[in-house]
Image (cartoon, rainbow, N blue to C red):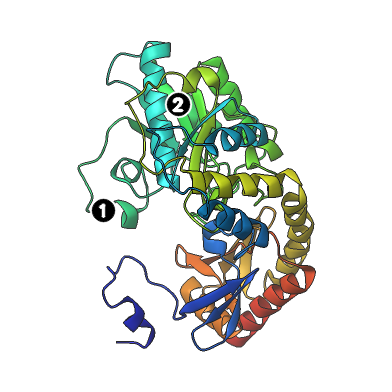
């Protein structure tokens, strides 16, 4: 057993983490059990958009811990209403439904879309279809992996949930051809994160919005990774001037403190669900709402979004200089990049292991791609450190 494995001897082996055991975190940095510091360039897949232990978020959590933590939705609590109002204003939607995890938010959106199809659009019962994109990642539940094209996420978990139609990501013509009288919704990531920060062609999301509006079909934007400042706007759909009917949110909404998620959308769509048809013991709990409200206050300032834009431009320049010098290409939006490693240097995993020796934590995906997604609170000096670590690791492997 490796030294680090002793900390997970009784944990199911569903992850293959890097060989670091984190004990403390502050801002963009974490410290392992041996006292070595690393810059966290993964940000827990964007759940730590505001860094580790942001003082405003910790203060909100501590204050609420001294008052009330959980009631369940069997009763009202004094934090849910203000949180819901602020969130709807932030993402320019009418109504929200609180949950806990990103996968729960997506499942909730799928249920809402089907209900809306039956109760508002008149689709025959049990015939609703939802169009999704190849390469997607929306979570790990049975229904969600039913329309995954990743064999690792999908194989061995059948039988699968019917009612999903898959089309190539970024191909509006293919999406249009897949529409039938039973189509109730299109579910898309504005940028595909787990696939390697795959950015669709210019105008794609606007084309999809036009198609769905014309055919009375819901557009569901999964902004769980791309949203809440990551790409330089509050939502990626806002950045490209597209307004979805439903938007799923999670990860950063909990401020890196606890799981918080939500679906926000059109009032008429959200109104199709009735008491008793969907819920969660912890969804909308006072502690989650207090932290989520503090997250919204940070985003209302516009500072995280601006930092993602400005330092994202600097990161792009650094990455452009590495094309042909260890990387074969990259895709980048704000402080989010998918970097394709020259396979002659090694796999993405091997590069991440070398990056760790240089004091940088990152994550690989799909063999030869690594992702950089540092906290939006990163400074110029910290960004320089991140880029220097990447340059040094690639040079070491050359």
Report x, y in % for residue 393.
61, 82
Tell me whether circle 1 and circle 2 mark residues in contact (CB < 8 Å): no
Relative depth, front residue between 64 and 299 = 64
Q: CA distance from mark 1 to mark 2?
A: 25 Å
State the mark number for residue 155: 1
The residue carrying pointer 2 sits among few (fewer than 14), some (14 to 19) or many (20 or more) residues within 10 Å by Cα, namely: many
Q: Secondary structure at mark 2?
A: strand
Residue 321 against residue 397 in the figure, above or below? above
- First-in-chain label (1 vs 2): 1
223 w.r.t. 187: above or below: below
Question: Mark 1, residues whose alpha carbon is within 10 Å: few (<14), some, or many (≥20)?
Answer: few
Of badges 1 and 2, nearer the viewer stands 2
Q: Single out the residue that lies furthest toward the front.
A: 67
What number of labels is visible? 2
Which residue in the protein does label 2 denote? 185
Q: What secondary structure is marked by label 1?
A: loop
- Of residues 354 and 9, which is closer to you in this image? 9
Relative placement, left or right, of 285 versus 243 is left
């Amino acid at each position: 057993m490796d030294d680090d494995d002793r900390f997970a001897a009784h944990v199911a082996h569903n992850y293959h983490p890097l060989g670091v055991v984190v004990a403390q975190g502050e801002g963009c940095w974490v410290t392992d059990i041996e006292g070595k510091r690393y810059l966290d360039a993964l940000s827990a897949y964007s759940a730590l958009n505001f860094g580790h232990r942001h003082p405003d978020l910790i203060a909100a959590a501590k204050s609420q811990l001294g008052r009330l933590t959980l009631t369940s939705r069997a009763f009202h609590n004094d934090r849910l209403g203000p949180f819901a109002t602020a969130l709807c204003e932030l993402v320019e939607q009418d109504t929200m439904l609180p949950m806990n995890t990103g996968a729960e938010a997506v499942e909730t959106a799928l249920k809402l879309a089907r209900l809306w199809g039956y109760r508002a659009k008149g689709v025959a019962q049990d015939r609703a279809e939802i169009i999704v994109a190849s390469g997607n990642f929306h979570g790990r539940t049975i229904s969600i992996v039913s329309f995954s094209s990743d064999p690792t996420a999908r194989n061995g978990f059948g039988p699968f949930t019917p009612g999903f139609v898959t089309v190539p990501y970024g191909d509006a013509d293919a999406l249009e051809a897949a529409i039938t009288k039973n189509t109730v919704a299109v579910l898309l990531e504005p940028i595909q994160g787990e696939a390697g920060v795959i950015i669709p062609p210019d105008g794609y999301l606007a084309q999809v919005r036009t198609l769905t509006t014309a055919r009375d079909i819901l557009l569901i934007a999964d902004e769980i990774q791309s949203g809440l400042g990551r790409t330089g706007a509050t939502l990626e759909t806002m950045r490209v001037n597209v307004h979805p009917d439903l938007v799923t949110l999670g990860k950063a909404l909990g401020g890196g403190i606890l799981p918080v998620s939500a679906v926000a959308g059109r009032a008429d769509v959200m109104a199709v669900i009735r008491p008793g048809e969907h819920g969660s013991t912890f969804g909308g709990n006072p502690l989650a709402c207090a932290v989520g409200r503090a997250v919204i206050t940070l985003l209302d300032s516009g500072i995280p979004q601006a930092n993602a834009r400005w330092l994202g431009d600097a990161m792009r320049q650094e990455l452009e200089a590495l094309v042909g010098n260890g990387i074969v290409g990259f895709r980048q939006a704000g402080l989010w990049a998918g970097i394709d490693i020259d396979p002659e240097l090694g796999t993405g995993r091997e590069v991440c292991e070398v990056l760790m020796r240089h004091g940088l934590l990152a994550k690989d995906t799909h063999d030869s791609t690594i992702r950089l997604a540092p906290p939006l609170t990163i400074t110029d000096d910290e960004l320089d450190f991140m880029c220097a670590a990447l340059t040094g690791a690639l040079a070491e492997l050359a």
